[in-house]
Image: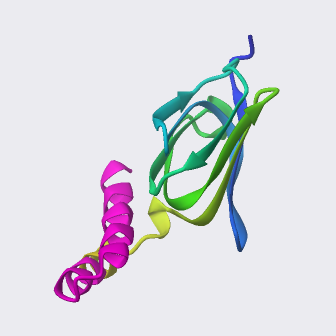
Amino acid sequence: MAAELHVELVAADRKVWSGEATLVVARTTSGDIGVMPGHQPLLGVLESGPVTIRTTSEDGGGTVVAAVHGGFISFADNKLSLLAEIAELADEIDAQRAERALERAQSEEDAAAERRADIRLRAVAVR
């Protein structure tokens, strides 16, 4: 069994992150899933939520967190693909702007916008 897996996090408009990892945690329609090297092949639908990627020592040995809004996850041959409708790395998220968006969505009773802002803030909190 390999000690790492190759991960590609791609949004509709760009490649968000690519590298080697030891663990990826994401939310699917079936619940949260953790994928490690040697995991059984899978194909699932991503729910909106934070994705956590534990990188290998070659990639700095840290944690990458992204806010993901819908998409698909697939794993085969030690390659994990996260194909998201929208994805933002936590480092790219302006927390104050996300807080303002959350407040605005709550006052306008816009549940979808409120959920997006909440996920962005949760991703920032995890990093």
The residue at the point 30 percent across, 74 percent down is 111
- As drawn, 18 above or below 58: below
Quarter holding residue 22: top right
Reply yes or no: does residue 115 show up in magenta. yes
Instruction: Locate the N terminus and report the quarter of the image it occupies.
Output: top right
In x, y percent, where is residue 47? 49, 52
Q: Depth check: give the residue in front, 84 or 124.
A: 84
- As drawn, 51 above or below 108: above
Q: Is residue 3 left or right of residue 79?
A: left
Quarter holding residue 5: top right
Quarter holding residue 86: bottom right
Q: How is the image coloured?
A: rainbow
- As drawn, 102 above or below 86: below
Reply yes or no: does residue 88 show up in magenta. no
The residue at the point 74 percent across, 16 percent down is 2
In x, y percent, where is residue 72? 65, 51
The residue at the point 68 percent across, 18 percent down is 3
- For the record, the magenta segment spans 100-127
The residue at the point 71 percent across, 40 percent down is 74
Q: Is residue 122 left or right of residue 45?
A: left
Q: Main secondary structure of the magenta part?
A: helix
Q: Depth check: give the residue in front, 85 or 58.
A: 85
In x, y percent, where is residue 6? 74, 36
Extreme-top residue of the structure: 1
Extreme-right residue of the structure: 77
